Image: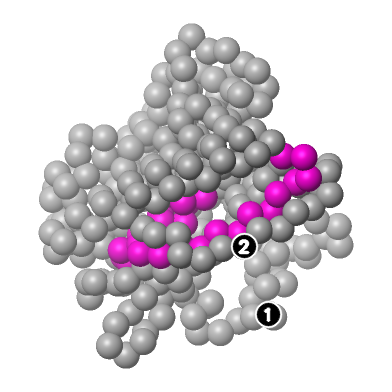
Amino acid sequence: MADVPNVLLAHGGGGRLMNELIESVFLPAFGNPLLDQRNDSAVIDLGDRRIAFTTDSYVVRPLFFPGGDIGTLAVNGTVNDLAMCGARPRWLSAGFIIEEGLPMETLRRVVQSMQHAAATAGVQLVTGDTKVVDKGKGDGLFINTAGIGVIEHPAAPAPAHVVPGDVVVLSGDIGRHGIAIMSVREGLQFESAIESDCAPLAAPVMALLEHGLQIHCLRDLTRGGLASGLNEIAMAAGVQLDIDESAVAVRDEVRGACELLGLDPLYVANEGRFIAILPPADLPRALDVLGSDARCIGAAGDGTAGLVTLKNRLGVARVLDLLSGEQLPRIC
């Protein structure tokens, strides 16, 4: 493992640097059986029931973007982390770090959108906190959330359950969230408007579980995009994941924007997409439950543990590695 630099990069997260930071700083200090699950949420056994518990912070710039804002992002991102552990999201907390001078109308808009997103996702915001920082110290508004969900099914999706032969299902097209953010941030105009895919994912996950499918692992694709999500699972599960690029859906306008900006859509953030890893016998039913946008994009193998390979449209395979940092900073 490479040493973490003494001065952290300004925009870490979702890449190799953040993984090294977790491995060399946080896990040695806080390591325990719950944290060692290495999942989107901690799964806690209370005896008569199991719950999932998660936390996240949101620092998106700009605060409002096509398809959402920092408020919808905070609710949906937390709901989705709970869902990836097979939990039905129930309760949220919210901490608001407000920069001095933020217009009250801006704060009201964010709060109203959070309430709408919470109602849509079927969760309640039950506790919170506010802090104000000096002007120029907070990018307008930061939001920290925590969430609790109830696990209603025996299944406990986690990377440790992935085995060679499992198939990888992607729930929809990728890259729209990151490109939506970039288009506003840089004042770019594209022929077709690109909106973020920001959405709650609990409903499709609950549908998979309620149909009795053996879901071995779930992962929502946020910072670092599809490529980072696949690498995190491969490393935690100790398997090789082999992906077919031609099966990964990218809208033409997103692909064109990525080419213009020099970005790889496989690494661009999403906020409404996930991957499900399951036995091949359950694949037809999973695709039926998730709908026509879902596709099988690859499988787990017994090759090099922790490796992700990508076969391109010409049939040539290459290693799909983690980036050192992020292509787009501050997007979730």
Q: Is residue 59 left or right of residue 219?
A: right
Q: Quadrant of the N terminus?
A: bottom right
Compared with residue 325, is residue 130 higher up or lower down, i.e. above or below?
below
Marks 2 and 1, the one that precedes in the sequence? 1
For label 1, count other residues whose C-alpha is less than 10 Å away and answer few (under 14), some (14-19) or many (20+): few
User: Badge 1 is on which residue?
Assistant: 28
Read off the magenta span: 74-102
Q: Residue at x 56, y 63 (%)?
A: 128
Residue 248 in percent (x, y) is at 37, 35
Residue 212 in percent (x, y) is at 14, 64
Residue 284, magenta (yes or no): no
Q: For the residue marked with disc 1, what is the amino acid?
A: Pro
Specify the quadrant of the image occupied by residue 132: bottom right
Q: Residue at x 69, y 53 (%)?
A: 97
Q: Is residue 258 left or right of residue 117?
A: right
Compared with residue 178, is residue 220 higher up or lower down, i.e. above or below?
below
User: Badge 2 is on which residue?
Assistant: 129
Frontmost residue, 63 versus 313: 63
Q: Quadrant of the C terminus?
A: top right
Compared with residue 226, is residue 184 higher up or lower down, i.e. above or below?
above
State the residue lying farthest toward the right: 6
Q: Residue at x 54, y 20 (%)?
A: 257
